[in-house]
Amino acid sequence: MIINGVTIDATFAEAFPMKATRAIITAQNEKWALIAAQAMTGFATSVIACGCEAGIERTLSPEETPDGRPGVAVMIFAMGGKGLAKQLETRAGQCVLTSPTSALFAGIDGGTRIPLGKNLRYFGDGFQIAKVIGGKRYWRVPVMDGEFLAEATTGQVEAIGGGNFLVLAQSQPQALAACEAAIEEMRKIPNVIMPFPGGVVRSGSKVGSKYKSLGASSNDAFCPTLKGMTKTDLSPDIESVMEIVIDGLTKADIDHAMRVGIQAVCDLGAANGIQRISAGNYGGKLGPFHFHLQEIMA
């Protein structure tokens, strides 16, 4: 398959089951809602070392939020429900409770209920009070700028992590420009996040390492500087490879995000140095969800 001069490899991205939740952060203005959201989703690129994968899903207008203020929807993914609940509570307490003018609401109504503000209320030292509005419980916690309002719980649902595709280009600036174009379009898709910095990862990995203490190491087959030293998957004209990783609530959500992202890359085409689109997989041994590139783009 070739789109605008870009070869779409006959391969698939391999993904695995995760648990996910969404929270809505509001504040006096969008600036402070984003500050809280950025803090809450920091150091959350990969479950390998961060404990979760998190990102900003989108900004919300006052008409879309529970309290009629500007807001941001954030999503957090983890390998299990217990770990997800812990990450959510810790990040909310350290990054949203502390952020000026912030409030915190559930972003998923269904699924298994997990604590959102339920335990954060204890920061109020006995001065906190609960309000039930429309069948939902909220906690009002006194803080120095007024009060912190937080919904008691949010929903946890089944999700998928590890959807991905690789952009292979003639140069580093071309690969990055293509990824930026892809991310711009993918961020318009609901129910997905791209957890790595700016949505892009340059240090794609393989399972295993020559060092026993490491479970993953550099994907040498896609490293341009190692063409003459390893079993490379790169032709001589490819000098840069970058990856976009996608977590989503459903397979259809990730399919959609991959489709628009790959199309954005192909729109730039071979004329802008883009040679191939590929994907990372482990022979089907890592996870049960397989995203076949040519099927997605068909």
Image (tube, rainbow, N blue to C red):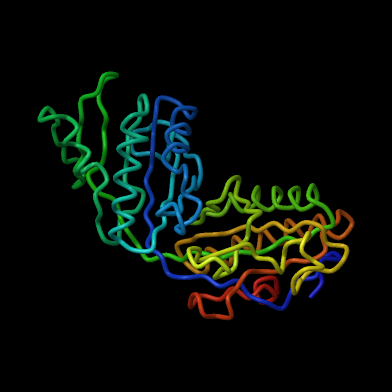
Residue farthest front in this picture: 211
The one nearer the camera, 22 or 14, is: 14
Q: Does 274 appear above or below 279?
A: above
Q: Quadrant of the N terminus?
A: bottom right
In terms of image quadrants, where is residue 26? top left
User: Residue, x 58% and y 67% (percent of image)?
Assistant: 255
Where, quadrant-wise, is the C terminus in this rendering?
bottom right
Residue at the image position 41 percent from the left and 57 percent from the top: 77
Q: Position of residue 142 (x, y in %)?
A: 20, 25
Q: Nearer the viewer, residue 83 or 193?
A: 83
Above/below status of 276 relative to 28 = below
Q: Decide if residue 225 is on the left or right side of residue 33.
A: right
- Give coordinates of residue 197: x percent, y percent: 58, 46
Q: Residue at x 45, y 62 (%)?
A: 249
Q: Nearer the viewer, residue 138 or 273?
A: 273
On screen, 131 above or below 146? below
How many labels, in total? 0
Of residues 127 and 71, the one nearer the viewer is 127
Q: Residue furthest left?
A: 126
Residue 43 position in % (x across, y down): 47, 45
Outermost residue on the top side: it is 145
- Position of residue 292 in the picture relative to residue 89 (left or right): right
Residue 287 appears left or right of 228? left
Q: Position of residue 206 (x, y in %)?
A: 59, 68
